Structure formats: structure tokens, C-alpha cells
Amino acid sequence: MGNHSVVSEFILLGLSADPQVQALLFVLFLVIYLLTLMGNLTLLLVIRVDSRLHIPMFFFLGQLSFLDLCHSSVTVPKLLENLLSEKKTISVEGCMAQVFFVFATGGTESCLLTAMAYDRYVAISSPLLYSQVMNRQRCMGLVWASWGLAFLDGLINILVALSLDFCEAQTIHHFSCELPSLYPLSCSDVTASFITLLGSSFLHFFGNFLLIFFSYVRILSTILAINSTTGRSKAFSTCFSHVIAVCFFYGSGLLRYLMPPSGSPLEAVFSVQYSVVTPMLNPLIYSLKNTEVKAGVRRFLRKCF
């Protein structure tokens, strides 16, 4: 970066310039972050210690909880620091590192949600073959593939972004470093980076979204073919939590990365949704709508207290 960049650090404007509002936001985001840590760690422990939850569905859920911890921790600690600091700066190297890990964790979650949709499809369409198809080797392969593809995607984008020159402008109208927010600051041509970002967004996120969509088309056709009302209701209930998680993640994430960089408050709102709020909500969504998870949490709490 030293050969390309005159600017050594950026200024993150955050969500508000009012000190009183910043104090309130600090308390709000600190509470959200603590709830995120507590909820996801509890879910991880429950799935780990309860042998009744050692099935593929909850294996993927445990991986999602671990990923939410990572994804939230990429941006929230720096956000909390800047809300209390007068000098709201981040080094260019630190900014690029944050961009990479936002890509890596967000991309992994996109792939993992696709794997979870496939798991639900197999469970509903081929229940007798479920344990054979979704064996431990295949589950581990899907998880490692999710991490590998996302890190490759993040690496390609960050290597192209390293060629950007930042000469004068330092102010990022955001609370974290994301690639679209850096384009207005560059005094060099951003076409290559933008095309790379657009291509990876279509291939990685839209590709996964289409796989999830087609999985649920097949799931829906299978459920509608079930004669029993109770059976249909039970099948729908096993998918409901996953559908809500997909809507939260894709609804905000895709809108954020497809919006033209303009410094609009909506950009920060969408980023807060998928990087701060969604990791907190996922444990609640799966705990409240899944009877096995609720029972596992109760058993875990009885053992602890």
C-alpha cells in the first residue's frame, strides 16, 4: 500500500456527529454486541454438549453461530471504539483488512445458508436417506467449501483494491470500511475493482441465492404433496427459521453492495442490519421457532443452575 497511497489513515464519520447521540449509540451497540456474544455462545455450547442435537441441521446451526460471532466482531469493536473517541481514524492497512474480513465472513454466511437449504431439502424430500446423504464427511466438506470460496472471493477483491490510490480525501461516510465506501475516496480508476466486486456479487451472492431459491421450490412442491395437514405443518416449521435468516441476510446485504456509493444514510442502515443486528437475531430466530433447540437450552440451563 505504501507505494500506491499518500493517505495513511481514514476518518470514519460513523452514524452521528452529535456527542449525546454517540453516547446513546454506544450503549445500544454495546448491548447488541453483548447479546450477540451471549446468544451465539450459548447456542454453540448447547449444540456441543447435548447429544440429541448432534445431527446435521444443528451442526450447520452451530457453524452459523460461530460465523455470526466472527462477522459481528469484524466491525462492532471498532464501531464502539470510535463512538467514544474524538479521533475516529483507521489506518489504510486496517481498513483493507476490515474490507477483507467483511467479505470473508459475509461470503461464508452466504454459502452456509445455501448448505442449510440443501440440508432441509434432503431432510424433507428424502427422509429415509437423510442420515446417509448428509453424513459427517459431506457436512464438513460443505462447511470447508463455504469458508474456502468466501476467502478466495475476499482475496481476489482485496488484491484488486490494493491498486487503488488514495491521495487527498480521507473521510468515509460510514462506521466501517466496506469496498463501495472507498470508491469515492480514490483518485485512481476504480473500474477494475468495481467490475470485480460486481462480478463476485453476482456469482457468489446471487449464485447462492438462486440455489437457495431452487431448493425451496423443490421443498415447497414436496410439502404440498404431503397428504397430512400435521405433516405439512411440521415440514414448514423446520424451514421457517432458515427462511427468516435468509431474508434478513440477503435483504440488507445485497441492497448494500448493489447501491451506488453516495454516502446515503441508507448504506449505513443496511450495513447495521446485516453486520450488527442479524448476528444477534439469528440465535433468537432459531431458538424461538425450533422446539429441539428450546428443549436443549432448557436442559443446558438445568445442568448449569
Image (cartoon, rainbow, N blue to C red):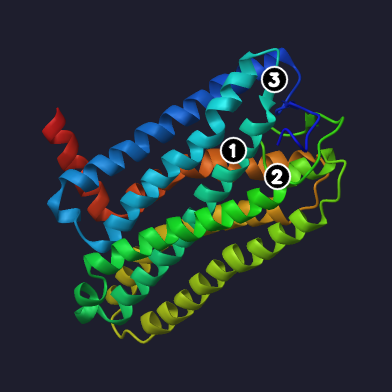
Q: Secondary structure at mark 2?
A: loop
Determine whether, in the image, residue 59 is placed left or right of residue 34.
Answer: left
Q: Is residue 55 above or below residue 287?
A: below
Q: Quadrant of residue 182?
A: top right
Q: Quadrant of residue 16?
A: top right
Any part of residue 304 in sight: yes
User: In the orientation shown, which residue stands out farthest toward the front?
Assistant: 3
Q: Quadrant of residue 26?
A: top right
Specify the amino acid type for callout 2.
Leu
Specify the amino acid type for callout 3.
Lys
**What count of labels does the image hold?**
3
Looking at the image, which is closer to me, 139 or 158?
Answer: 158
> In the rendering, at what x and y percent does residue 125 appear?
32, 81
Cα gap from disc 3 to disc 2, whole angstroms: 22 Å
Specify the amino acid type for callout 1.
Ala
Q: Which residue, given by chain and number where applicable, does mark 2 sit on?
A: 162
Residue under the image location 28 percent in, 75 percent down = 231
Around disc 2, counting alpha carbons within 10 Å, would you say few (fewer than 14), some (14 to 19), or many (20 or more)?
some
Q: Which residue, given by chain and number where applicable, does mark 1 sit on?
A: 97
Q: Name the mark on residue 88.
A: 3
Looking at the image, which is closer to me, 237 or 41?
Answer: 41
- For marks 2 and 1, the one nearer the N-term is 1
> In the rendering, at what x and y percent does residue 77 appear?
53, 26
- For marks 3 and 1, the one nearer the N-term is 3
Looking at the image, which is closer to me, 25 or 192?
Answer: 192
Residue under the image location 36 percent in, 40 percent down = 40
Residue under the image location 33 percent in, 57 percent down = 60
